[in-house]
Image: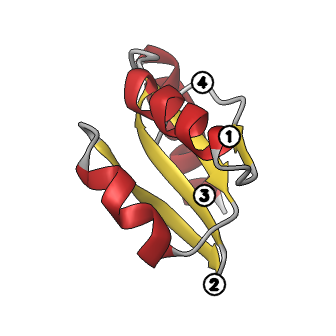
Amino acid sequence: RKQCIETAYHRARILQQVDSCGAMLAVSCSSDYIRPLLERHEQVWIAAYNAPNSLTLGGIKQSITSISNELSKENIFNRILKINSAY
């Protein structure tokens, strides 16, 4: 139990020091659909496969914002997550 508490403490401490240049995006589409978009943007990746048509992307804010705008134009649900640092 002590080790779990120490791990949580150090994770929080480190995340507070990380530059907040990253962002995360929840997306309602398949990985096959999103891959071509990822290839056109720098430093962005699939951070989580939540369901067959539900992904979370992580990356630099500029790329995440650009992908969000493209998906919105195509009427694909997406939402930039309110986080302090991407992982």
Q: Residues within 10 Å of mark 2 (few under 14, many from 20)?
A: few
Q: Are marks 2 and 4 in contact (CB under 8 Å)?
A: no
Identified at 63% across, 68% down, the residue is 29
Q: Secondary structure at mark 3?
A: helix
Secondary structure under the numbered disc 2 in the rendered image: loop
Name the residue beneath numbered marker 4.
84
The Cα–Cα distance between marks 4 and 1, rounded to whole angstroms, is 23 Å
N-terminal-most mark, 2 or 4: 2
Distance between the alpha carbons at the discs numbered 2 and 3: 32 Å
Q: Which residue is mark 1?
A: 72
Residue 69, given in percent of the width and then of the height, sits at 58, 32
Instruction: Single out the mark in the foreground, 2 or 1.
Output: 1
Q: Which residue is mark 2?
A: 52
Indicate the quadrant where residue 56 lies: bottom right
Relative horizontal placement of residue 48, taking residue 2 as reference (left or right): left
Residue under the point 37% across and 52% down: 37
Nearer to the camera, 37 or 56:
37
Q: In the rendered image of this protein, does residue 15 appear above or below residue 53?
A: above
Residue at the spot of label 3: 4
Between disc 3 and disc 4, whose residue precedes? 3
Who comes first in sequence, dot 2 or dot 3?
A: 3
Say whether marks 2 and 1 touch (CB < 8 Å). no
